[in-house]
Image: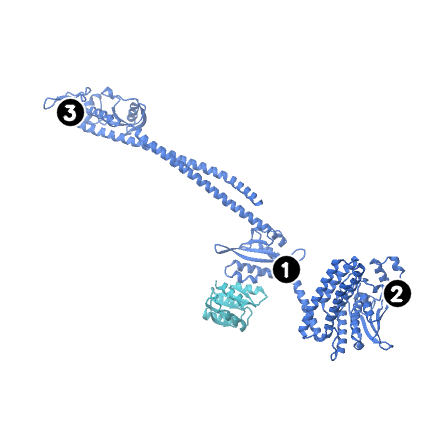
Chain colours: A cyan, B blue
Amino acid sequence: MKLLIVDDSSIIRGRIARILSDPRLPEIRIIGMARNGVEAVGLSQQFKPELVTMDLTMPEMDGVECTEAIATLNPKVNILIISALSDKATAIKALKKGAKGFLYKPFTDEQLIQAFLEMID
Amino acid sequence: MATTSTSVIATKSVISKYRALTVGLIVFWTVCVGASLWINIDRTYRHAEEAAGHQARTAFDKDVIYRRWSSRLGGVYAKVTETTPPNPYLRDPERDISGAKGEPLTKINPAYMTRIVHELGELSSGIVGHITSNNPIRPGNEPDPWEARALTLLESHPDMKEFSERQIMNGKPYLRFIGPLITEESCMGCHAFQGYKVGEQRGGISVSVPMEPFLVQANSATVFLGISHAGLWLFGVVFFFMFIRNLIKSDEQIAMAQEETTEILTTVHEGLFLLDKNGKMGTQFSASLPGMMRREIQPGMDFTAILREMVPQKVFENATSYIELLLGNRVKESLVADLNPLNEVEIEGDSGAKHYLSFNFNRVLEEGEISHLLVTVQDVTERVYLEQQLEAAKDRSRKEVEVLLNLLQKDPVTLQQFFTTTEQSLTQINERLRNDDDTMEGRMHILAYIMRVVHGIKGEAAALGAEMFESYAHSFEQELVVMRERGEVRGEDIVRITVLLEGFYERLASMSSIATRAVGSPSASKDGAAVPTEGAEEKIIKSFEENIRNLAQRIAIDDGKQVVVVTDIAQIATLPRRITKELGSIAVQLVRNAVKHGIEPLQDRIAQGKSPHGEIQISCRETEVPDQFDFVVRDNGRGISVARIRKQLITSGRMSAAEAEALNAKDVIMKIFETGFSTAEEADRDAGRGVGMDVIADKVLKIRGNLMLNSKIGEFTEFRVRFDA
């Protein structure tokens, strides 16, 4: 399964990458890490990820727009919004644009693994 | 029991509902089976008749054929025997001839032949053949009544090829058959004289087949039919009963399920209802829902419309989007629960206090498809308030720790002193509780003593900004006031006081451990005397000043007053520790009194043309007498009103009007130093306990000082403590 991580924080990118070795998860291969929406759309076009983790507040192109762009490219993609946003409205907007789930930042490893399992279920 | 009886009622109504159906089905089934039986029996007997008819027809056809054969030959000759005599009715000159050996032969004409065959047939098979005509040559061939009728029928209907009917002959059932005989050329030889013409129908042959063998067969078939139909009927009836029983059972189950649902919906605390894809509420909802939503709820109401009235526009928009997402199957239910905008929402009611509801949405699947959302509504008002309170409390204690830490940094000596003196005071209370005389009078004395100590701690805590201690001391004090006002201290009161003291110790221990952790080892020795350090004097004055200012400002802010504290206390630093300690406590109580009782409310001051902020002066100076000091707390407030004290003495019931009037001004003022006196109308943590002045008096006594009071109504109040260092 191909994963694209979209987050402008290298710490979050690193954390997501770290949990992928959990035995409960199927084999997930990171095909790219994007620091902003523009990069993310580019990587999606090139590598067609099946799973995307998406930050909402990013420079250049925000998460909602980016979600819409990626979901338009591939309607079957599983996008998980990961955000510290206190504004639920933006997250709901992203879901309406094609994301499948939402995870609050900060999160525990276990929460992230469970979210991944739900997403690819 | 309730459930059982209702289910019995349900069963009864279900049964009566199905009684008509049961009766109808059985009647219908009976008619069907009856009709089938009747048709089958009828067919069986008809078959029997047909079989007999067939036999009769065969016999008839055979007769016709051999007659034709015989008439074409013009008859045949046979030897004359007893059973074959010459036919007397045959008009033929060649009727009797001789054979080759001279033996007599006679002609057997077709009619004669037929008769002979019929006689033989009757003997062998019981089938009675009879050649007949309405105009017979031989009298024996005359028709019987049935044959006569049948012949007439056939003659009048030339197209009829045969006629048959069941008849009783000689008391036995027969099928009687008759077929017409058509005149042929060969017949004319004998019958021409009668005027017959070729092609005419003249007479016929009747065949009577005994029905008995056929009927026996038909009867046994009928018995079989009867039995099988009875079985079929019974099977049907049983089937119907089972069918109805199943219907009743399933109806009962439905009724029971419905009853259970109703029971659940009436008892459950949560608001429950189903929401369909068009945003409409289901037909059933829990009884608690309307109360929770504070509105009338009708089945099938538009939830979106209700929601629009209940929450702000923005929340409403988010909520409808969220519901839409859940009704679609793209998002994962478990991964969006955190985004529920109605998780804790303040409801905009038309009236009453605001309340908070929590709406939770769960998908309801039907055959794998999302059909509805189950909405669970909870009133979370209490939880929200608790959370708010908890948050506020957290905030307060955070501030308090901050204050303490601040104090620790700036003035660890004072803080440590507070911990130590408080602990000592508490220990002293404990000891007195243990040792003092246990008379009611003794107990009341201890009570007054404890009140003074607790009040003192409260004042010091307030001065330090340790609100947790202050408020604990305040509630401690409130309980003590109740006991004092009751006028007796019971055994359980002593227990209660011990418990309260324990609470004090705990708070003290946790605070002092925080303090110890924050600065390492305490800078005070165990006996409470501060270890003199470099610059300690300056510190004492500074913290003394700061404490007093903080206390004055805090009380002023609480009361909506403005105060300025002016100090001149440098000489305090030269005094021995045992005196400064007491002076601190005295200052706290006096400043508190000054802000609380002395300084007027802002509007009063303005109305009197005074400056809006009151002023409190605190000074400590050596008098002309060496080693004699005056510690003065003076405010420019309303002054002490003798009239006001007198009035309070009367209204509080401490004195009758006459007694109060009899006192002179000095005696009236002395009353404020008595335990339990207060002019504040409502007790709060800063005034009104009627402890305070007596604490001061107590402390002044400890340093062997004198307390002097000077006051002018509308201008000032001054307390002066004079003591020797």
In terms of image quadrants, where is residue B452?
bottom right
Q: Which element is circle 1 on?
A: helix
Labelled disc at residue B77: 3
Distance from disc 3 to disc 2, alpha carbons, whole Å, reads: 185 Å
Name the amino acid type tagged 3: Tyr
Q: Chain of mark 3?
A: B
Q: Which element is circle 2 on?
A: helix
Point out residue B221 in the picture as x, y percentages from the top left corner: 34, 34
Is residue A9 in sight in this rendering?
no
Q: Decide: is A75 above or below B630.
A: above
Q: Is residue B371 left or right of residue B212?
A: right
Labelled disc at residue B666: 2
In terms of image quadrants, where is residue B570?
bottom right
- In the rendered image, residues at marks 3 and 1 fall on the same chain: yes
Name the amino acid type tagged 2: Lys
Pointer 3 or 2: first along the chain:
3
- In the rendered image, residues at marks 2 and 1 fall on the same chain: yes
Q: Which element is circle 3 on?
A: strand
Q: Which residue is mark 1?
A: B383
Query: In this view of the protein, which residue sits in the foreground, B484 or A80?
Result: B484
Point out residue A50 in the picture as x, y percentages from the top left corner: 47, 66
